Amino acid sequence: MATPSSTNSVALDRIAARRYLPLMPRRILWVGVAIALVAFSSIFAEVRVGVLLRPATAVAVWKFLAGLFPPDLSADFLRIVLRATTQTMAMALASTLLSIAFALPFGILATATLWNRTGLLAGEVHSFAFGLGAVSSRLARALLGFVRAVPDLVWGLLFVAAVGLGALAGTLALAVAYSGVLGRVYADVFEHVDPQPLEALQSTGATRMQIFLRGIWPQALPHLTAYTLYSFECCVRAAAVLGFVGAGGIGYEISISMRLFEYGQVLTLLLVFILLLTVTDAASRYLRARSVNNAQRVRKVKAQANASALMQLIRTSGRLALRILVLPLLIGSFALAGFTPHTLSQAGIATSLVKFVLRMLPPDLTWSFLSSLGTALLQTIAISLLGTLIGVGLAVVLAVPATSTLAFVPGDSPGRRRVIDRVLRWLLFWSTRLVLNILRSIPELVWVLICILAVGIGPFAGTIALGLHTAGVLGKLYAETMEEVPLWPVEALRSLGARPLQLLVWAIWPQARPLLSSYTVLRWEMNLRAATILGLVGGGGLGQAIYNNVQLGFYSRLSTLILVIYALVLASDWIGERLRVGVA
């Protein structure tokens, strides 16, 4: 006879089965769609696995690796490296300052709480000024979105075509590209401040600018400072890459050395580039942390009314001396970045830019040209999908030994660990961390040039290059995410004698899965943007079409390609948002 407990168990099993069975066809459908996407992407990305297995490929890779050593440390070349590094830093600093000058007014105009929403502007809803401000705010936000969507390397190519080769083109390109990023960030920060001080100011009859200066700006300043420093860090990375399209800096020297097969020079430049990024990252983190700490101490400093006049004088003198020292640095950065009277007068920058824009208008929207972009567009999408898939696979393999929770075993865990075992775990952990750092520190365009040596020019080289760079980025994110999950489930399973693989499957993965999935989707969106420019150095896709049309002087087609990239980025943002909602 069935007992109540067994009857209840059978009923629960039937309920679970009814809920689970409808999900099976849907899951099978999604698996089929994924397989079809990989298959079609492999066709358009021109994947040739057999090429990787050829002896000639191994010989080419070995020849490249052997040519890297020893690095070129001759005095003549080191002077070139120093000049290129200084120029890269000058471009980054000058472009950051210019992007702030452009982004701040557009960020204020794009702030919805000042122009679009009726909370602070209840008395002006039906006025002409309110309508004009609302329209201008939406246009400003749309312009920032367009500027942000176009990759910085494409801006670099446009400015090189407009004003010529050199650091000036790169600085202007970065200023435009990052003004879109900063403007959008500034607007978002301005919108999310505490509204109570704003409402108090509005109740006293304050104008928009008074509300902004007295209510929004003081609250937003610490966040603006932190993100602007992060933007400078990104500008350093971008400035080093813009040289691949002739905009000066380290990237230009790497491109020349690769074309001349001077691999020892390439290694020297890459080491300097990685060192430059490491120093910039560390300095940026330090300054961001200090700006946040200073903001938190403002009230304490103001409360110290008994501070001596001498100490106040010393602090004021120190700030003044620092500003005096910074001023020549800023002036020198603009000079090294190409903003000299001779360069500006010789380039005729304003006239050149106007003529170039006029040659890009109207866009070429003929069917013959639009239909010719189908293959390049599908190649770009295929490169992004397969590059992300390759990166995810490599990242998973490298992230597991790079996770300290799995690599190192606490001394109080069950079982004895030999010294040799601990040494091997330590070596494996730090070697995989080093590999991840190298993979993500080398830009995608450099990886493309390296992969071209192995598999030749085309989208397959771009796919492998994107996968290698993605593996470094995602591997680090995966490892750090798995390290930051709550440890009590891990410790509970470890106390029962669970092995690292069991800890990963049953304790770490269930907690980290949503965030890991979100990172993966976000990286695909970024890879789609990157895939549009890999063709500038032979990686296929839309970048190849952009490069060809610039070389041929077909600027009306170039504007069409920029619009296609913009539409592609908007579509990827929409798809990515839906995927993140689905995995949340």
Image (cartoon, rainbow, N blue to C red):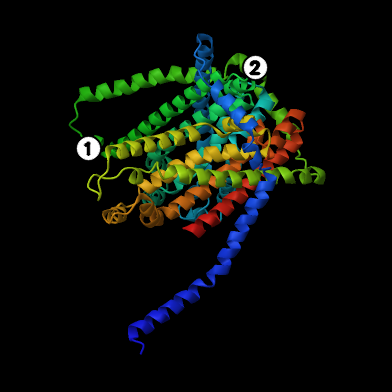
Instruction: Report the residue at 46% width, 31% height from top.
Output: 233
Residue where numbered disc 2 is placed: 345
Tell which circle, 1 or 2, labels the residue nearer the N-terminal end: 1
Instruction: Report the residue at 54% width, 72% height from top.
Output: 22
User: Where does residue 256 sit, x and y in percent of width and height?
Assistant: 62, 20
User: Where does residue 249 sit, x and y in percent of width and height?
Assistant: 56, 22
Tell me, yes or no, if residue 566 can be seen here. no
Q: Could you say which quadrant of the image residue 337 lies in?
A: top right
Which amino acid does the dot numbered 2 rest on? Ser
Residue where numbered disc 1 is placed: 303
Q: Quadrant of the N terminus?
A: bottom left
User: Going by the image, does 52 lie left or right of 419?
Assistant: right
User: Where does residue 290 sit, x and y in percent of width and height?
Assistant: 33, 33
Which amino acid does the dot numbered 1 rest on? Ala
Label 1 or label 2, whichever lies nearer to me, is 2
User: Where does residue 203 sit, x and y in percent of width and height?
Assistant: 39, 52
User: Going by the image, does 201 lie left or right of 96?
Assistant: left
Nearest the eye: 160 or 551: 551
Q: Secondary structure at mark 2?
A: helix
Nearest the eye: 579 or 466: 466
Q: Could you say which quadrant of the image residue 136 lies in?
A: top right
Q: Secondary structure at mark 1?
A: helix
* Cα–Cα span, label 1 and label 2: 53 Å
